[in-house]
Image: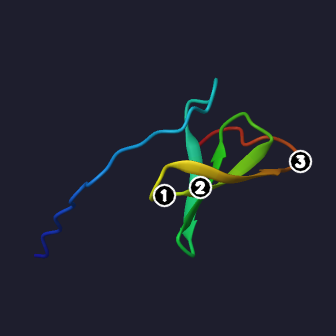
Amino acid sequence: MTVLKLKVDMIWKLEVGVSPAEHGVYKDGFLYLAPTFRDEFWKVDPEKGHIVKVFKMPGHVWGA
């Protein structure tokens, strides 16, 4: 049996407004997050917790 330990060095959060959750992927050192009920997704620097770029998209992310 493999035991995995997770060490957390920092915690940050992004204000997503009325959205209850984000949906996203981690790729090439960045998080790409799509907040629920928004018509955009964000490129996020995971080291600082800052939105690097906002991308507009048609429609909305309706939920999980």
Q: How far apart are the two marked residues, 1 and 3, measured between alpha carbons?
A: 25 Å
Question: What SS does tag 1 mark?
Answer: loop
Disc with the residue nearer the chain's start (1 vs 3) = 1
Q: How far apart are the two marked residues, 2 and 3, measured between alpha carbons?
A: 20 Å
**Which quadrant of the figure has residue 25?**
bottom right
**Front tag of 1 and 3:** 1
Disc with the residue nearer the chain's start (2 vs 3) = 2
Where does the image place residue 61, in percent across and percent down from the top left?
Answer: 72, 43
Question: What SS does tag 3 mark?
Answer: loop
From the image, tell me which residue sits under label 2.
44
Given the image, on which type of amino acid does mark 2 rest? Val
Where does the image place residue 33, in percent across and percent down from the top left?
Answer: 62, 52
Question: What SS does tag 2 mark?
Answer: strand
Q: Is residue 27 left or right of residue 58?
A: left
Disc 1 crowd, CA 10 A, few/some/many (<14, 14-19, 20+): some
Given the image, on which type of amino acid does mark 1 rest? Pro
Residue 4 is labelled as none
From the image, tell me which residue sits under label 3.
58
Q: Residue furthest right?
A: 58
Q: Residue at x 12, y 70 (%)?
A: 3
Which quadrant would the N terminus be assigned to in this image?
A: bottom left
Q: Is residue 19 left or right of residue 4?
A: right
Where does the image place residue 49, in percent across and percent down from the top left?
Answer: 50, 49
Given the image, on which type of amino acid does mark 3 rest? Pro
In contact (CB < 8 Å): disc 1 and disc 3: no
Which quadrant would the C terminus be assigned to in this image?
A: top right
Vertically, is 64 above or below 24?
above
Judging depth in this view, the residue of 44 and 22 nearest the camera is 44
Vertically, is 9 above or below 61?
below
Q: Is residue 6 left or right of residue 26?
A: left
From the image, tell me which residue sits under label 1.
46
**Which quadrant of the figure has residue 5?**
bottom left
